[in-house]
Amino acid sequence: MIVVMKPDASLKQVDHIVTEIERLGLRGHIIVGTERTVVAALGEKRDGAMQALETCPGVEKVMPILAPYKMASSEVKKEPTCVEVLNLKVGAGKIGVIAGPCSVESREQILLVAQQVKEAGATALRGGAFKPRTSPYSFQGMKEKGLELLAEARAATGLAIVTEVMASEHVAMVAQYADVLQVGARNMQNYPLLEKVGESGKVVLLKRGPSATMDEFLLAAEYILKTGNPNVILCERGIRTFEDHTRYTLPLATVPYLHQTTHLPVVVDPSHGTGKASLVAPMAVASIAAGADGLIIEVHPDPEKAVSDGYQSLTPAAFAALMTECRKVAAALGRSM
Ligand code: PEP
Ligand code: MN
């Protein structure tokens, strides 16, 4: 349930509510909004708890949270959340663009593409150092060496680094180098990993599992939020359907649906979502039109030579053209990027 405080409630009254919530065997989470503070009481339902809290000083009302996810729900926080790290700002009107290769392949490759995507207007650099590959015989990533190169690219460009962490035991290492920990689609329901990335305190980019429902997606985000880490960015990257003209099916209704149900920012990955370079820009433009808070785009200095996902990677020039198109749509809707 959520305890909505009166606009003039004091800090002492808010603290008292948290104490009372804990006395009832629940966990209290304070969420400071622009107009008022609310305290979410999380845990198993307790008889009489709502009535007990309603009589406390400074309380306006107590309401049940109907959604199965609590802290992610817009019932708890009406204003959209902006997640920020370095120059990457995503949400609450800000559009962040994360671009770079599928995999970090070499020092030359990552430093060059970092410069190229920065020039085109990206605010973060992506690049996988630990790669979840369908085949165990495919390139698995440069691992820690790749992370070092990403950190070097950040030092050279100022771009925030977004990279995937595949296993709980790698979280501490990846967190030393990255600004944003990406949880891949295959790991969306790896609950110990979600808790570990949450505890790292880093911004988390959570990709939707290819067969996850919206409730499952938001409950996965809830695992991260529950650790006390509010910095979660949701990413629609396509789902599996009978359709085979694209690698996945990219459902853009996800964007407005999530904006109605959660305060968390939503970005779209049209690269994995379509699997075809020629479809990436139109779907990126459509994502912005649908209200996406950002994009994650695969860009390679020479897509033909890419060790992974070359067929869906844009050249730097094509990425620059995509940015131009997206900016026009954003401007038409009164937003900028
Ligand atoms: C990626 O971003 O390179 C990736 C592997 O994405 P996903 O987890 O969405 O397949
Ligand atoms: Mn990829």
Image (spheres, rainbow, N blue to C red):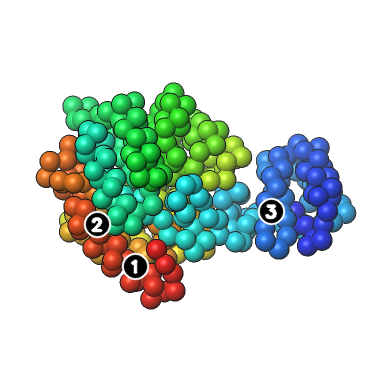
Is disc 3 in contact with disc 1, using a CB cutoff of under 8 Å?
no
The alpha-carbon separation of the residues under discs 1 and 2 comes to: 12 Å
Question: Residue 120, image x and y in percent?
Answer: 29, 57
Is disc 3 in contact with disc 2, using a CB cutoff of under 8 Å?
no
Q: Nearer the viewer, residue 94 or 64?
A: 94
Is 115 left or right of 163, judged from the image as shown? left
Is 252 situated above or below 145?
below
At x 71% / y 39%, what residue is drawn?
A: 27
Is 98 left or right of 200, judged from the image as shown? left
Which residue position is annotated with label 3? Answer: 32
Which residue position is annotated with label 1? Answer: 327
Question: Residue 80, image x and y in percent?
Answer: 55, 60
At x 26% / y 36%, what residue is drawn?
A: 104
The alpha-carbon separation of the residues under discs 3 and 1 comes to: 32 Å
At x 49% / y 42%, what residue is drawn?
A: 203
Residue farthest toward the bottom in the current orientation of the protein: 332
The alpha-carbon separation of the residues under discs 3 and 2 comes to: 38 Å
All told, the count of numbered labels is: 3
Is 302 left or right of 319, judged from the image as shown? left
Which image quadrant is residue 286 in? Answer: bottom left
Q: Earlier in the sequence, mark 3 or mark 2?
A: 3
Residue farthest toward the front in the current orientation of the protein: 156
Q: Amino acid at mark 1?
A: Arg
Q: Secondary structure at mark 2?
A: helix
Q: Which mark is residue 283?
A: none
